[in-house]
Amino acid sequence: MNRAEIIAVGSELLTPYRLDTNSLFLTEELNRLGIAVVRKSVVADDRQALAAAFREALERADLVVSTGGLGPTEDDLTREAAADALDRRLLLDESVLENIRERFARLGRAMAPNNQRQAMVPEGAAVLPNSSGTAPGLWIETGERAVLLLPGPPGELRRIFAERARPLIERRAGARRMAHRMLRAVGLPESDVDHRVAPIYQSYADVETTILATPEGIEIHLTRWSDDQAESTRVLDELAARIATTLGDAVFSTEGETLDGAIARELQQAGLSVAVAESCTGGIVSSRLTRIPGSSLFFLGGAVCYSNQMKTAWAGVPAELIERHGAVSSEVAIALAEGARSATGAALGLGLTGIAGPGGGTPEKPVGTVHIALAHEGGVREQLILFAGDRERIRRLAAQSALDILRRHLLRARRERG
Amino acid sequence: MNRAEIIAVGSELLTPYRLDTNSLFLTEELNRLGIAVVRKSVVADDRQALAAAFREALERADLVVSTGGLGPTEDDLTREAAADALDRRLLLDESVLENIRERFARLGRAMAPNNQRQAMVPEGAAVLPNSSGTAPGLWIETGERAVLLLPGPPGELRRIFAERARPLIERRAGARRMAHRMLRAVGLPESDVDHRVAPIYQSYADVETTILATPEGIEIHLTRWSDDQAESTRVLDELAARIATTLGDAVFSTEGETLDGAIARELQQAGLSVAVAESCTGGIVSSRLTRIPGSSLFFLGGAVCYSNQMKTAWAGVPAELIERHGAVSSEVAIALAEGARSATGAALGLGLTGIAGPGGGTPEKPVGTVHIALAHEGGVREQLILFAGDRERIRRLAAQSALDILRRHLLRARRERG
């Protein structure tokens, strides 16, 4: 068993408002078992169309996994369509019915007659009990191939897969497995990253390399399929190390850590604390630093100094400094960083001021102008960056850059400590 | 022309790391032209598999739209596969080649030999020029049906669709069109919303109703397909009004406005300003209130008072109050709200304190306990809410609830003003 197709069932997934995301989870799980996903489809709640989709998929793949359409309503036709495609009868399974009845009884409600539909099972199918909902999963073998029907709610789907379906698939999987490594980098454009690392990964013909730009940095995914897991680990470790060396400090994680997490770790290792005074980012820098559990150990406080008055009141920025240089200036960014530090007693202070737009730009200070300052025991460092994009993008990128400036400072400090 | 299929091309879309999102844009555009999307597929960069996918889709739909696989590399096989499926030859189009050469010349770079592949055009296809990239779109008619090939980068795809493809499709579309209305609600669980509005929408057999829970509230989508646009407008207006009446103040938008936007509008209409002192939400409330352009007109400042010391320094919460009641208490939430108000001079102050977890919970104050207070000219209102979920979910939901408390206050104030 090494080729799978995923069919997401539901007319609502064919509207502009909803995406199938279950297939990402399933793809990751199947890949880990050495099974490649060769096609994904989204099909409406239409018995004939769905039965045809099952038939076609079974011609191309060893394993067909469907998600959704196992509910109790007339629109839920996955059971019927799979039975049609496999030429099986649907039979009432008394033990499934009993489970559904018990579930309703526990919740103190009467079972609706419709729910009986969820106890219909294609002849010869294995029932995969659902501990968090009424629709069980179903596993139907047909010769060397198999069909797996899973309910659509992500929590139910994940649990049934992990507890019930994975062992059934694993038994039929070959020795080939997928190994995966992800590096995260920040502070370089995507095209630069690719330009620098392409000569390296191109010499690894058996590794697939995918570079993705995300709002929180660039992800470099390395994937290798092999029978020999130890060899894959060796190859991916080596390639990841070479890429990390080439990109240098831009890489902040080779084991899935987030930027916020990397900063939290560095701060705690160094025994340092941080505080923020931000203007154009409106609280995003603080909200990211507090995402990490236990952030109260290193985050002392954040001031969203939107008005000039609050820059003075909360971060002690002298009113005449703002008057003289303007609220968006190196001087005010530095004063915000130093003010955050002294107001809270933190070891490090971050200060941001800028123009997120769409209004407020001038020829000298266009929309996207952001000053970022970091104050520390030994002094202060300030940087002017011009970001492109809409208001929200400028805010996100400015916060990301401020966090990266903080991270790089912590790296340097660690090296100096030796 | 009224049934379309969308084929997203690219092996990277069959990994766990990437989703096809272009199809949401295309579905919305096609629906507006009266065309339903009946299936979506994701197919690997494999010429045979892709040609088969085009053939199958053309049997089911009038219009097949593909995205991606039009780049210059050997992996980009959409042109070849579409030509195979339609039994057309691929011919070099000199004018396309000239455009690509000019584009490279403008950028001061030499055209790579590979780029010549992008000038290959299936016989009889119309070229849809791409003003922001090298790959043109292609439109190929076959009898009553048509195939539209679009490049994968979203900006290029959207522009080619809007400027070139839409008129071609519109000419072949029937009189039937889709009308759409969306309501947004907050402060009620999804199942409650459905329970209350189902009896209403069920009496509109010709309207499709989809209820979606999103991190920023519940969306109620109403869709009606008809030849008679005026009638659709009338029906959807009526249904939307009935749903809005039933859900009352929970509905904050019937025309696509966000919660942040609705609050910004109410604040500006009332000429009121707001400030925030938040603890467990770590800056999320401030960052949402500042998302809206022009928020400096009504947002005065936000304090992320993570430590007790900063609750006292920035929001004037008496240390003995924290000592007596604990940092997570009604009293401290109220003091934060009043402190935000008096520190900034804002008309309204929001205060939040709670336990986002995973640590820090006790039997009396479990993880998820959040106190939210709103201070205003006439007094203060405080609420204790217990949220379920992980740290990030608790933070998001608490921020959402605080914004909803602010919105409902502004609604009441508007009614009192008359």
Image (spheres, coloured by chain):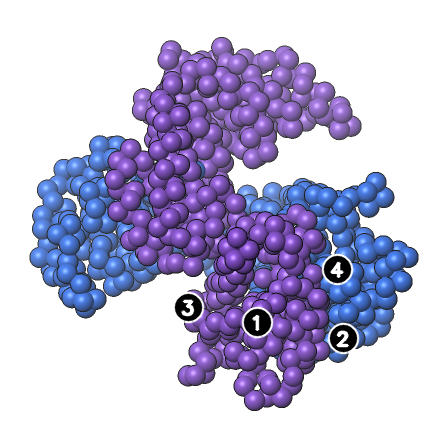
Chain colours: A purple, B blue
Foreground mark, 4 or 3, reads 4
Q: Secondary structure at mark 2?
A: helix
Where is residue A343? Give x, y as percent: 71, 71
- Vertical arrangement, residue A187 with respect to residue B358, above or below: below
- Alpha-carbon neighbours of circle 1 within 10 Å: few (<14), some, or many (≥20)? few
Find the distance from the CA under tag 4 to the CA under tag 3: 35 Å
Q: Earlier in the sequence, mark 3 or mark 1?
A: 1
Chain at tag 1: A
State the residue in front, A129 or B317: B317
Location of residue A290 by image quarter = bottom right
**Other-residue count near label 2 (Cα within 10 Å), few / some / many at <14 / 14–19 / ≥20:** many
* Same chain assignment for discs 1 and 2: no
Q: Is residue A4 above or below residue A415?
A: above
Asked if disc 4 and disc 1 are in contact, CB closer than 8 Å, the reply is: no
Closest to the camera, between mark 1 and mark 2, is: 1
Of the two numbered discs 2 and 4 in the rendering, the one whose residue sits closer to the viewer: 4
Q: Are marks 3 and 2 on the same chain?
A: no
Give the residue at mark 3.
A388
